Amino acid sequence: MSKSHTLKHPGRVAVDAGVIKTFWERKIQLHTEQLQSEAMRMRRSALDRLRGEWAQMLEGRTKALQGPPEVATRPSLLGTEPFHTQDTTAA
């Protein structure tokens, strides 16, 4: 821009295209660094682990409150007869 043009329009600032390019490249770089640091902070956060632990605890509590768990009956090794401790034979 010529000097006479800037004198006619004092509110306008004449800037080189390279300066504008450098300005925006720096802005983009800073924004990218901020996004990366935020992503790293979120990865290091214990929030997800704590949420998982709380969900597990609440799930166990809900199951306990719904009723006693069904007990699976296993076949006895001794058969169906009860075990007697007293000997009824002749002594």
Image (cartoon, helix red, strand yellow):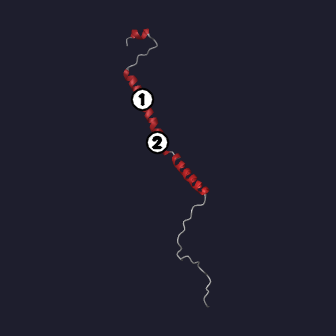
Q: Residue at x 41, y 27 (%)?
A: 24
Tell me residue 58's x, y (percent): 58, 52
- The C terminus appears in which quarter of the rendering? bottom right
**Residue at image mark 2:** 40
Q: Amino acid at mark 2?
A: Met
Graded by Cα atoms within 10 Å as few (under 14), some (14 to 19) or many (20 or more), the crowding at tag 1 reads few
Which residue is disc 1 drawn over? 26
Relative horizontal placement of residue 76, taking residue 5 as reference (left or right): right
Q: Are marks 2 and 1 in contact (CB under 8 Å)?
A: no
Q: Is residue 52 above or below residue 36?
A: below
Q: Residue at x 53, y 46 (%)?
A: 47
Q: Taking 52 as reference, is 41 above or below it?
A: above
Which residue is nearer to you in this view: 6 or 56? 56
Residue 79, given in percent of the width and then of the height, sits at 54, 76
Q: Nearer the viewer, residue 46 or 19?
A: 46
**Which residue is pictured at 61% across the width and 56% down the height?**
65
Please name the amino acid that badge 1 sits on.
Arg
Q: What percent of the width, then of the height, locates residue 89? A: 60, 88
Q: Nearer the viewer, residue 46 or 9?
A: 46
